[in-house]
């Protein structure tokens, strides 16, 4: 999964144009295939409003990203949660996010800098009834990215843990492309969440994914 993000501070016309651009890129390159809605406003109303707008015009995967579980709750209560992932869980709020993910049958993305703690949090979420889990180790550079994702892949294989996958949150442009490429090479089922990808980046990632899959 390759996601491009949208801020809940954007105007409606800008959101519609961005979704149209993402649709065009997906048609031409197969990626991105997901939209991540960021709660930059730190408020419930704009986040829920943008979630409704995007869900109405984009029927594919959506990630709802907020550090406030009650904001996430209002959003999932307001939209069709088919193909929805909620992001914002960490060691301090995992229980509440897991409750929401279980109740609405959504994927849950958990963030934690310590890879060992991250795996433990993922296993705990599974014990709490979450069916599908993404693990975001919050990497900051390509070396750390390669080391961490190789570690996660090895540990998850040893544990025999199904439906638990690595995720990466990165920025835009060539940096996002580099981080995404390293993550995909270390784990081809990784979820990549970026702030932006231009056409050239989409083309490169599409070619890389085709190579890894076939």
Image: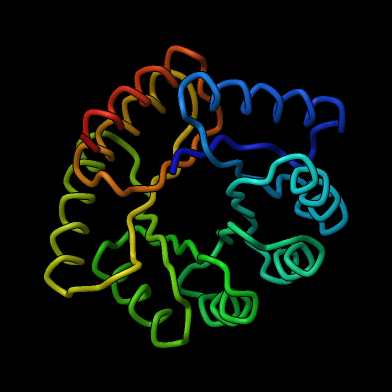
Relative depth, front residue between 128 and 22: 22
Question: Does 118 sit left or right of 27 as displayed?
Answer: left
Vertical relation: 21 (above or below) 109: above
Question: Does 144 sit left or right of 90 as displayed?
Answer: left
Check the picture and name the quadrant holding the N terminus: top left
In the rendered image, the residue lying farthest to the top is 200
Which quarter of the picture shows residue 139? top left
Q: Residue at x 29, y 29 (%)?
A: 210
Question: Does 110 sit left or right of 83 as displayed?
Answer: left
Image location of residue 155, percent across then percent down: 16, 66
Question: Does 114 sit left or right of 57 as displayed?
Answer: left
Image location of residue 55, percent across then percent down: 75, 48
Relative depth, front residue between 82 and 168: 82
Image location of residue 119, percent across then percent down: 29, 70
Q: Residue at x 34, y 66 (%)?
A: 164
Which quarter of the picture shows residue 74? bottom right
Q: Residue at x 38, y 24 (%)?
A: 175
Relative depth, front residue between 25 and 85: 25
Relative depth, front residue between 157 and 178: 157
Vertical relation: 39 (above or below) 12: below
Check the picture and name the quadrant holding the C terminus: top left
Q: Residue at x 73, y 66 (%)?
A: 76
Image location of residue 20, percent across then percent down: 71, 25
């Amino acid at each position: 999964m390759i996601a491009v993000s949208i801020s809940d501070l954007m105007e409606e016309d800008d959101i519609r144009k961005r979704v149209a651009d993402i649709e065009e890129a997906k048609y031409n390159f197969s990626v991105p295939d997901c939209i991540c809605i960021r709660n930059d406003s730190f408020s419930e109303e704009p986040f829920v409003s943008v979630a409704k707008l995007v869900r109405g015009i984009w029927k594919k995967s959506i990630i709802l990203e907020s550090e406030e579980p009650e904001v996430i709750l209002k959003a999932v209560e307001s939209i069709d949660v088919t193909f929805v992932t909620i992001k914002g869980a960490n060691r301090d709020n995992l229980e509440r996010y897991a409750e929401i993910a279980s109740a609405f049958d959504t994927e849950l993305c958990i963030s934690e800098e310590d890879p060992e703690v991250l795996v433990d949090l993922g296993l705990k979420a599974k014990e709490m009834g979450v069916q599908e889990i993404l693990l975001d180790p919050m990497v900051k550079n390509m070396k750390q990215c390669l080391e961490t994702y190789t570690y996660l892949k090895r540990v998850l294989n040893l544990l025999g843990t199904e439906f638990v996958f690595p995720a990466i949150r990165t920025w835009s442009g060539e940096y996002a492309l580099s981080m995404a490429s390293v993550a995909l090479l270390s784990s081809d089922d990784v979820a990549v969440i970026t702030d932006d990808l231009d056409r050239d980046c989409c083309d490169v990632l599409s070619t890389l994914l085709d190579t890894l899959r076939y």
